[in-house]
Image (cartoon, helix red, strand yellow):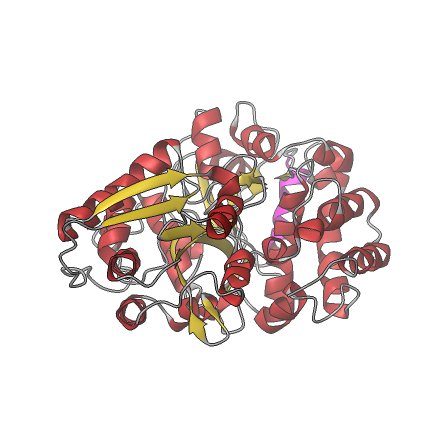
């Protein structure tokens, strides 16, 4: 679901993505959680809660916003996946736009079916003016089919003023800009139980080598180091992507994302070998390999912060914060904090993530004005103050975010620069990267069980070869 839902709950972000990135959707799949909800302070860049001053800025002041036309008498229809609290928060954005332009804006939420609903409306008539999708691959398909419109010059000027260049490239198809990311998700946050770390006398690790040392220290202290939600195959793809991005680098990440190099490539073998250092150790994972394979994403987070905890730390995106607060009594920023995913290679400043991007089905002034507004700091601030939201807009002040945890997530997002990449599995054909019990999900679950590096690489390539890649 948008910035994103755990393909069945709700779910992933940094700025300045590199050129070759194509929008993918950490969303659509029905199993990744919704992004943004709470992150937490924790290490280095995300270290202690309170380390971020509420007056600090992510790149500049919001200013008075873009000059928008008077749209009295005009109506705009918007389609997105948000419902419940997220829909109520997005309504604040709509209300702010209407107050500026006097336009009437109607909203339809379609959940995980948003791309399907949009496709149907485009084919049968009655398409919304604006849609927000978390599936870059779907956006590219719509653009190539001529079903959506390139963004107008004034919208692009707003993007240029507020986003690092990579975000514009992320929303471009064949040299034209078709979308801009409004809501982002960070899936490079590693959450830890502060009491367990204090008991073992350790601090958040910055490198994979330090991470393994921390695991050993925790284990020696009688504390299980890591909770892994292997019953949900998508969590394992996120583990792989973070290790691969740090080790193989952004260029190889882009190539593997589009199957321009095989899954038997040495870079894949190296990443799997690295993951095996954790996945191959029963003592490092709650319940060992078999236990990890029977643990859902939600349970992997809950059991790390319930009393008594079953593990000291758990990896998953910023959406883990909402699971912590809704299923345990742990307090974000105090009992539960996060640190950036430990660098497994030479790239140390990176983020794997996703988000919801706005596109236009027509080029009317009202449609373009709405997307121009979404690209402004004003629109982001309208939601940011409510929480559960992180923006890739560099001119949204840190003071717009309601707590230190979210501020830390936003700083991590903005600071990743060319080290940001959109979720790889969400950019893959669904049969390979987004189907329970098949493709990458199953292959990595089998890998967690067997530890067979070369056999897993070969199976991944065999399954990837069955699909048609863009």
Q: Residue at x 24, y 41 (%)?
A: 92
Residue 224 locus on image (x, y percent): 65, 35
- The one nearer the camera, 184 or 448, is 184
- The one nearer the camera, 382 or 53, is 382
Above or below for 21 versus 391: below
Residue 17 locus on image (x, y percent): 46, 67
Give the residues in magenta: 211-221
Q: Residue at x 64, y 64 (%)?
A: 257
Say whether residue 181 is visible.
Answer: yes
Could you tell whether 64 is left or right of 389 in the image? left
- The one nearer the camera, 193 or 266, is 266
Q: Residue at x 75, y 52 (%)?
A: 276
> Residue 236 colored magenta?
no
Could you tell whether 138 is left or right of 151 in the image? right
Residue 417 locus on image (x, y percent): 43, 68
Could you tell whether 49 is left or right of 258 in the image? left
Quarter of the view holding residue 217: top right
């Amino acid at each position: 679901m948008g910035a994103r839902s755990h393909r069945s709950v709700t779910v992933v972000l940094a700025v300045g993505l590199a050129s070759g990135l194509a929008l993918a959707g950490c969303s659509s799949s029905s199993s990744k959680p919704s992004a943004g909800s709470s992150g937490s302070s924790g290490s280095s860049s995300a270290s202690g809660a309170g380390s971020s001053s509420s007056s600090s800025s992510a790149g500049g002041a919001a200013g008075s916003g873009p000059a928008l036309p008077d749209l009295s008498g005009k109506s705009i229809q918007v389609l997105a996946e948000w419902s419940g609290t997220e829909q109520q928060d997005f309504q604040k954005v709509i209300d702010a736009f209407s107050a500026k332009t006097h336009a009437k804006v109607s909203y339809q939420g379609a959940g995980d079916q948003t791309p399907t609903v949009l496709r149907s409306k485009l084919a049968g008539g009655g398409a919304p003016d604006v849609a927000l999708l978390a599936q870059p691959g779907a956006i590219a398909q719509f653009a190539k089919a001529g079903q959506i419109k390139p963004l107008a010059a004034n919208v692009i000027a707003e993007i240029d003023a507020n986003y690092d260049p990579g975000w514009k490239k992320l929303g471009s198809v064949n040299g034209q800009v078709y979308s801009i990311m409004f809501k982002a998700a960070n899936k490079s946050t590693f959450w830890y139980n502060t009491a367990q770390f204090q008991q073992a006398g350790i601090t958040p690790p910055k490198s994979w080598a330090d991470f393994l040392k921390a695991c050993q220290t925790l284990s020696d202290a009688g504390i299980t180091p890591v909770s892994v939600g292997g019953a949900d195959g998508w969590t394992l793809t996120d583990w792989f992507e973070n290790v691969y991005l740090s080790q193989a680098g952004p260029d190889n990440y882009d190539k593997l994302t589009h199957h321009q190099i095989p899954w038997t490539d040495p870079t894949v073998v190296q990443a799997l070998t690295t993951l095996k250092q954790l996945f191959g150790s029963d003592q490092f994972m709650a319940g060992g390999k078999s236990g990890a394979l029977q643990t859902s994403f939600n349970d992997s987070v809950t059991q790390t912060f319930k009393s008594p905890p079953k593990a000291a730390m758990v990896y998953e995106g910023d959406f883990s914060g909402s699971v912590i607060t809704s299923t345990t009594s742990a307090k974000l920023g105090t009992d539960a904090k996060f640190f950036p995913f430990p660098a497994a290679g030479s790239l140390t400043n990176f983020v794997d993530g996703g988000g919801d991007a706005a596109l236009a089905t027509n080029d009317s002034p009202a449609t373009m004005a709405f997307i121009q507004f979404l690209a402004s700091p004003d629109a982001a601030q309208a939601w940011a103050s409510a929480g559960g939201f992180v923006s890739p807009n560099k001119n949204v002040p840190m003071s717009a975010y309601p707590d230190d945890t979210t501020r830390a997530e936003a700083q991590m997002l903005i600071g990743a620069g060319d080290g940001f990449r959109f979720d790889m599995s969400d950019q893959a054909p669904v049969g390979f990267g987004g189907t329970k019990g098949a493709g990458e999900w199953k292959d990595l679950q089998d890998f967690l069980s067997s530890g067979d590096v070369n056999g897993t690489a070969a199976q991944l390539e065999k399954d990837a070869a069955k699909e048609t890649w863009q």
